[in-house]
Amino acid sequence: MTYALRPLLAERWEELEGGRVTRFTLRRGVRFHDGSPFGARDVVAVLDLVGNPKLATNGARAEVADLEHWRALDEHTVELVWRRPSPLGLRALTRLPIYPAGALEGPFDSLPLGQKPVGTGPFRFEAWERGSTLSLVRHEGYWGERPFLDRVVFRIAKDSTVATQLFERGELDLMTAIQPTVWRSLELPESRNAWAVDGYVRIKSVDNSFSYIAWNEDRALFKDKRVRRALALLYPRDSVAKNVDLGLEQPTTCPYWLRGPYCDPAVKPLAYSPAEARALLAEAGWADHDGDGVLDKDGIPFRFTFLLPHTSVRLAKLAPLLQQELAGVGIAMDLEKVEGAVLSERIAHRDFDAVSQVWTEFDVEQDLSEVFHSGQESNTAGYSNPRVDALLEQIRGEAGAARRVELCREVHRLLYDDQPYLFMTARVSLDAAKKRVRGLRPSLVWYDLRRVWVSP
C-alpha cells in the first residue's frame, strides 16, 4: 500500500504557480447525512473555522500553517493559496472533517459536532451511549459504492479486563487492542483456547505509532542532554521486551513510521549500560555528596515524578522496572498515577517531570513540527534545537519526496543525539476477528469498513 493521495470528495485537483495554488474540483451529487448538498461553501466554512486564531483549533491550524488564503470560485470549485508549496499541508487537509456550513453557525464552544456528527461518508451516526456503545448505520444516500454492512456498533469497555471478558464470551466480531498476555496465551495448544482457534482469525500489524517517555526540559534536572542520554542507557530494554511486551513490540528510536523510508536505518537503540550512564551523570556533575544514596548537584537531589495514566497495563509493569534501574545508580523516581482527563490537563500545561504516552499518526508521512518545534505550544517536552526547527520548516516546503526523506533522517539523527524523548517501541496492533467477518485489511488508517462483509 503506497498511501498516495487520491481524490474522493474532490473529483480532481491541480497544482498551479509552482505549487503555491491548489484548485479542487469537488464531486457533484454528494449529500451530507442530513440530506443537505455538499459544495464549496462547506469546505470554506470548515477552513474558516480552522484558520480562526480565536478558536480552539490550534492543532489543525498548525498542520496547515502555510495555508494563506482560501475561497470558493463557484459552487464546486475551491482554491487554496499557500505561502509556499506545502506537500505536507496538502496531506493534512485529508484529515479535516467536512461539515455542512449550516452546522458550523453559532458559538464554537456550543457546536454539537462531537455529540451528533454529520458527514458525507458511507455510514452515518445513529446513537451514542456514553461509556457503552456507539452505533453507525449505512448511509443510503452515499454517493459511492454501497457498503455491505447495515450497521456497525462499537462496544466501549472501561478497561482491558472487561474488553477481554467480552472477547472471550464471543460478544465481539472484531476485538482490537488485545493485551500481549492474552495474545500469547491464545498461541498455546490447549483445549481452553479452542473458542479462539476455531472462531477467530488473529490480525497483527505495525502502526505508525510509538511509545515514549518525555523529559520535561523546563525542569533543571533534564536540561542537560548527557542526563537524558544517561536515562536512556538505564532503560532495561531487553527486560521490558521479554517480560512486558512479550516480544510483540518493535524497538525504535524514530518518530516516523518504522516501515517507511524516513527513519535512518543506521541509528540503533542505545544498549542498556549502567556503567556508561554513571559516567555521563558524573560528567554532568551528579554525585552522592551527602551519602544518602541519591545523587545530588548544587544541593538538589536527583528526584523526580513519573506521571502515568492509571489505566495503562503496560506502564504499570514497565515503570517499576525503570524505577529499580534508576535507583541502582542513585536516581529516585516516584510514580504518580492519574485519571486520563487529569493527565491531559497536566500535559497541556507542562505540569510534569516525566510522562509516558503513545504518539499515533494515520499517515505514512507527517509533519513533526507540532511535537518537536520549539515554537509550538504542543511541544510536550519543551524541546528546543535551532537546527531541528530549521529542518522541520524546510521539510514542510520541500516538494521533492527524496529530499524530504534525507531531511527527515537528519531530524531522526538529531533527536537521537539530543534524547528529548526516550523512544521505546513502535506499537503493534493486536486484533482478532470472527472467521465470518471478511474483507478486513489493516492499514495506517485502521480498517476500511466499506469493504467489510459478514458471511452467513
Image: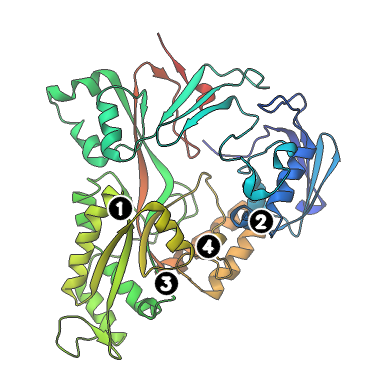
Which residue occupies the foreground of this view, 344 or 268? 344
Question: How far is disc 3 from disc 4 in space, using C-alphas?
Answer: 19 Å
For badge 1, the amino acid type reads: His
Circle 2 crowding by C-alpha within 10 Å: few under 14, some 14–19, many from 20: few
- Looking at marks 2 and 1 on the same chain, the residue that comes earlier in the sequence is marked by 2
Q: Which mark is residue 418?
A: 3
From the image, state whether disc 3 or disc 1 is nearer to you. Answer: 1
Position of 131 relative to 384 (above/below): above
Which residue position is annotated with label 1? 310
Question: How far is disc 4 from disc 1 in space, using C-alphas?
Answer: 23 Å
Question: How far is disc 3 from disc 2 in space, using C-alphas?
Answer: 34 Å
Question: How far is disc 2 from disc 4 in space, using C-alphas?
Answer: 16 Å
- Looking at marks 3 and 4 on the same chain, the residue that comes earlier in the sequence is marked by 4
Name the quadrant containing residue 100.
top right
Q: Which mark is residue 88?
A: none
Q: Are marks 3 and 4 in contact (CB under 8 Å)?
A: no
Position of 308 relative to 246 (above/below): below
Which residue position is annotated with label 2? 55
Which residue position is annotated with label 4? 378
From the image, state whether disc 2 or disc 4 is nearer to you. Answer: 2
Q: Is residue 269 visible to the viewer in this orientation of the structure?
A: no
Q: Are marks 2 and 4 in contact (CB under 8 Å)?
A: no
> SS class of the residue under badge 4?
loop
Name the quadrant containing residue 424.
bottom left
From the image, state whether disc 3 or disc 2 is nearer to you. Answer: 2
Q: Is residue 221 visible to the viewer in this orientation of the structure?
A: yes
For badge 4, the amino acid type reads: Ser
Q: Are marks 2 and 1 in contact (CB under 8 Å)?
A: no
